[in-house]
Image (tube, grey):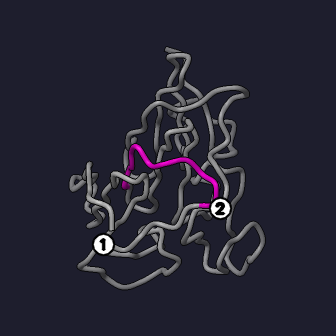
């Protein structure tokens, strides 16, 4: 396995998960896998050793990760971001949701996507430089044009979401 070059965790949210970015562009996570947050294809258990994050074939290398209460996201060296975990309301930002019992859009029937399938939908022509958690349920990222773009559960319309799990903040 490739050596870790960066460690990502967010203990203030209490999600009990840590992830590492590796020199070869892969990532691994360990800790509480509730909601499929580790990205290894499973949705339960506690892992005390790192487990590899599964990303789509041909995707870029991981340069940053965000752990949130219900899901995890990675930003890649090609400017895309991918998220996995709990997705009942579109919070993964990929344009899908996972209602109970649904196996459509790569959902597992239990409101989750335990591995990344589709990138976060960004404004046309934009790419991400970095990402960070925004509370328990959302993620924001700095785009290549200097604007901040957020996705996740925006129940109080804090960042101008249109109700589809995505929105932009003009800075």
Q: Secondary structure at mark 2?
A: loop
Q: Position of residue 137 (x, y in %)?
A: 45, 52
Relative to 33, is 14 on the left or the right?
left
Q: Which mark is residue 117?
A: 2
Q: Residue at x 40, y 41 (%)?
A: 134
Relative to 44, is 145 on the left or the right?
right
Front-lying residue, 130 or 108: 130
Q: Position of residue 100 (x, y in %)?
A: 67, 77
Q: Is 59 in the magenta?
A: yes
Q: Position of residue 153 (x, y in %)?
A: 54, 49
Q: Residue at x 32, y 60 (%)?
A: 19
In the picture, the quarter occupied by the N terminus is bottom left
Name which of mark 1 and mark 2 comes first in the sequence: 1
Q: Range of the magenta residues?
A: 56-67
Q: Residue at x 48, y 44 (%)?
A: 75
Q: Residue at x 40, y 54 (%)?
A: 24
Q: Read off the residue under disc 1.
A: 50
Q: Is 41 in the magenta?
A: no
User: As drawn, which residue projects farthest toward the bottom?
Assistant: 45
Front-lying residue, 142 or 51: 51
Specify the quadrant of the image occupied by residue 14.
bottom left
- What is the spatial separation of the Cα atoms under label 1 and label 2, in whole angstroms? 21 Å
Front-lying residue, 105 or 156: 105
Q: Position of residue 17 (x, y in %)?
A: 29, 65
Q: Is residue 111 above or below residue 4?
A: below
For the residues labelled 1 and 2, say whether their Cβ atoms are less than 8 Å apart: no
Estimate how packed mark 2 is, as few (under 14), some (14 to 19) or many (20 or more) residues with alpha carbons within 10 Å: some
Q: Secondary structure at mark 1?
A: strand
């Amino acid at each position: 396995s490739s050596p870790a070059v960066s460690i990502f965790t967010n203990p203030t949210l209490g999600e009990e998960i840590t992830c590492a970015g590796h020199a070869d562009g892969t990532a691994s996570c360990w800790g509480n896998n509730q909601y499929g947050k580790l990205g290894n294809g499973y949705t339960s258990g506690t892992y005390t050793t790192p487990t590899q994050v599964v990303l789509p074939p041909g995707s870029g290398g991981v340069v940053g990760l965000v752990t949130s209460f219900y899901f995890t996201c990675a930003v890649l060296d090609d400017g895309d971001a991918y998220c996995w975990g709990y997705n009942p309301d579109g919070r993964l930002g990929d344009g899908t949701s996972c209602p109970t019992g649904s196996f459509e859009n790569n959902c597992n029937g239990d409101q989750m996507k335990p591995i990344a399938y589709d990138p976060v939908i960004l404004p046309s022509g934009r790419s991400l430089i970095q990402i960070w958690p925004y509370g328990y349920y959302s993620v924001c990222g700095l785009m290549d044009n200097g604007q901040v773009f957020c996705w996740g559960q925006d129940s109080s319309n804090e960042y101008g979401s249109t109700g589809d799990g995505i929105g932009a903040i003009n800075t």
